[in-house]
Amino acid sequence: MPRTVEMLVGRHVRTTPVGRKFGSDRSDIQGLRAVAVGLVIVYHVWPTILPGGFVGVDVFFVISGFLIVGSLVREISKSNSLDLLSFYE
C-alpha cells in the first residue's frame, strides 16, 4: 500500500501520494506517444492513407521537446543554475 500524506483542507482531508516523482504517471504523454507510433505504423503499412508520413515523427519531437524543457526548468528551479554538460550525459 502506498504511503500518503494527509493534509487538512477546510473540513476535508486531502490524501497525496508520497515519493512519486514529478511526471512519473503521465497517461496523457503515454497516449500521445501511442498516437505518434500509430501514425508512423499507418504510414509504413498504408502510405496512401497518410501521405505526409512525417506527422508521427513530428508528434514524437514535440513530446520530446516538452519533456526536455520540463527537465531543464526543474533543474533550474531546484539549483538556480543549469549544467548542460551533465544534462547531456
Image (spheres, helix red, strand yellow):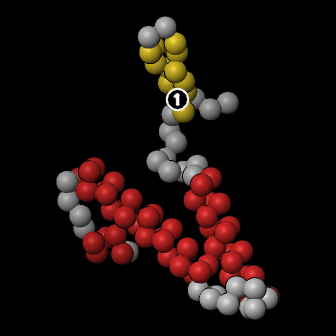
Residue occupying image coordinates x 27% and y 72%: 84
Taking the image as drawn, is residue 42 in sight?
yes
Residue 34 at x, y = what percent? 68, 67
Q: Is residue 41 left or right of residue 5?
A: right
Q: Is residue 35 left or right of residue 29?
A: right
Residue lying furthest top = 11
Q: Is residue 75 left or right of residue 63?
A: left
How crowded pointer 1 is (Cα within 10 Å; few <14, some 14-19, many 20+) is rated as few
Where 82 sits versus 21, above or below? below
Residue lying furthest left = 80
Residue 51 at x, y = what percent? 67, 90
Residue occupying image coordinates x 52% and y 12%: 12
Splitting the image into 4 quarters, where does residue 66 fall? bottom left
Residue 22 at x, y = what percent? 46, 48
Splitting the image into 4 quarters, where does residue 73 fall? bottom left
Q: Quadrant of the N terminus?
A: top right
Q: Secondary structure at mark 1?
A: strand
Splitting the image into 4 quarters, where does residue 42 fall? bottom right
Q: In this orientation, which residue lies closer to the viewer: 69 or 43? A: 43
Q: Is residue 37 left or right of residue 61?
A: right
Taking the image as drawn, is residue 44 in sight?
no
Q: Which residue is mark 1?
A: 16
Looking at the rendered structure, the kind of residue marked 1 is Thr
